[in-house]
Image (spheres, rainbow, N blue to C red):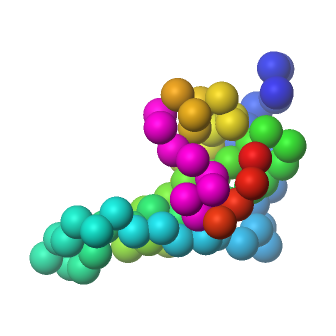
Amino acid sequence: MPGTDLYALPIDGVVFVKACGGSTHPDGEACAQLAKIGPNAWALRDSKRPHAEPLRFTTEELDAAGIDPARFGLSA
């Protein structure tokens, strides 16, 4: 998605899917939420802070970070 500003893509109404890593924190289990926001575009947020602005990545960036959308039940 060269030249696309990922933060310009709308995320209102997208569905975030949660995956938990099994580690716990005093506030609860550590979980991440991922949503597909466009072709080759993703939004990732902390399940404990769902109202915070999510980080946005391309599929290639997720792959480089070792984050597999399939872990969330999503397909690239």
Which residue in the rendered view is the most extreme toward the left? 26
Which region shows up in magenta? 65-72
Which residue in the rendered view is the most extreme toward the right? 39
Indicate whether 61 appears above or below 53.
above
- Whether residue 31 is in magenta: the answer is no
- Whether residue 71 is in magenta: the answer is yes
Which residue lies at the image location 53% right of the left edge and 64% below the top edge?
33
Which residue lies at the image location 13% right of the left edge and 76% below the top edge?
26
Pick the residue in front: 46 or 18: 18
Q: How many numbered discs, if any? A: 0
Residue 15 can be seen, yes or no:
yes
Q: Is residue 30 left or right of residue 58?
A: left
Which residue lies at the image location 17% right of the left edge and 71% below the top edge?
25
Residue 8 can be seen, yes or no:
no
Pick the residue in front: 24 or 54: 24
The quarter in which the N terminus is drawn is top right
Q: Quadrant of residue 70?
A: bottom right
Q: Position of residue 48 (x, y in %)?
A: 38, 73
